Amino acid sequence: MIIPRQDRMPNYGPLVSYPQRDQRPGFNPHPEDLSVYGSRGSLESAPGYATPTVAERPPMAFYGSGSTTGCSLPLNLGVTPYPAQFPPPRTPMSMSQDPFAPGCAIRSPDVEETSLGRSGGVPTPATDNRLPRRSSHRDEFDGPHQFLRPPPTAIVAAQERELPHVPTNLLVQEQDDVLSRVNDRLSQCAFDFIAKYQFPVPLEQDKRPIQVPSDREWSEWVNLLKRLATKRRIPARVLYQGQIKQFITILENSLEMRHAAKHQSRPLKDDRNILQLISAGLQVAKILKDAACMEFMDTVYRQTERVIQARKATPGFIG
């Protein structure tokens, strides 16, 4: 009698002995099975027992192709068939079905369902359930929109009255002089800031390399600083209170300085607008932490404000 090795035998639970009455006709265990499952009495005494021939013995169960590498492992215990009280072993898995073996692919049951259509197995694109992509050339105002309720007639009439007079006490030459001084000082401030922290300045074919602040206009300095901030070349620690998010907004508020200083055909600005432009330059010097430039801007602001107040107190001067 051949007794299988216990270390190669699967764990199907504790060994159980079956009474004589369970050996009913039709249950023909293999002689080797009795050493595994136990018995009561002799095989010859079991009713309906017939010694099986070699041809009647079921074949040995194998997992995979019988090799000891990869996803296959032979299982030759010689213990078949199994009694009705114990379920048969699981269906042997092939190499492509073993999800735990190295190199074996796991195939999801949803693959065919998602890759094939619902009718006739016709492949459908993966974007069937997605929303249609919005065209970049489509005008959003041509789509669903609304109109606000018009204001009352009295409010419209009050809005359409003649605009109130805003005092303008500075002459054109005085305005140009103030704005040019502020523009040049801001260029010097940007030049010193970039040179101090050694920020890279891209070379442009149509422009000469920068040697002095006047080699670039204030608008060009603003664009350069904005590009440095956008590319995260300027750390927040070099700015006042780390205001990196407000940096670009403060720079853009001062862009009108260059336009007002260079274009002589511009309309005359009122006093408050001139003071506002000087204040914008003061904010640029503050965020760049340039104390000397801040003092200059503050001095220009006070001088300009003093001239405006003096013109207002002059009798006969029409501002």
Image (spheres, grey):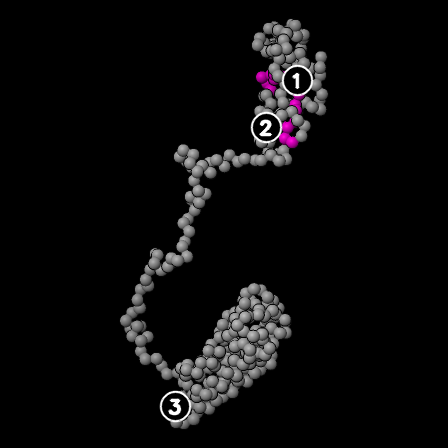
Q: Is tag 3's residue or tag 1's residue first in the polypeptide sequence?
A: 1
- Residue 71 is inside the magenta segment: yes
Q: Nearer the viewer, mark 3 or mark 1?
A: 1
User: Which quarter of the image is occupied by the C terminus?
Assistant: bottom left
Q: Where does residue 106 sit, x and y in percent of width and height? A: 57, 35
Residue receiving disc 3: 318
Q: Amino acid at mark 3?
A: Ile
Residue receiving disc 2: 94
Give how far apart the Cα atoms at labels 1 and 2 are: 21 Å
Which quadrant of the figure has residue 14? top right
| Segment colored magenta | 70-86
Residue for point 55% across, 79% down: 214
25 lies above or below 161: above
Q: Amino acid at mark 2?
A: Ser
- Judge by depth and name the residue closer to the eye, 151 or 217: 217
Which quadrant of the figure has residue 10? top right
State the predominant SS element of the stretch in magenta.
loop
Under tag 1, what secondary structure? loop
Please state if 212 lies on the left or on the right of 280 as rendered: right
For label 1, the crowd category at 10 Å Cα-Cα, with few meaning under 14, some 14 to 19 and many 20 or more, is: some
Q: Is residue 249 visible?
A: yes
Under tag 3, what secondary structure? loop
User: Which quarter of the image is occupied by the N terminus?
Assistant: top right
Give how far apart the Cα atoms at labels 2 and 3 are: 101 Å
For label 3, the crowd category at 10 Å Cα-Cα, with few meaning under 14, some 14 to 19 and many 20 or more, is: few
- Residue 284 is inside the magenta segment: no
271 lies above or below 150: below
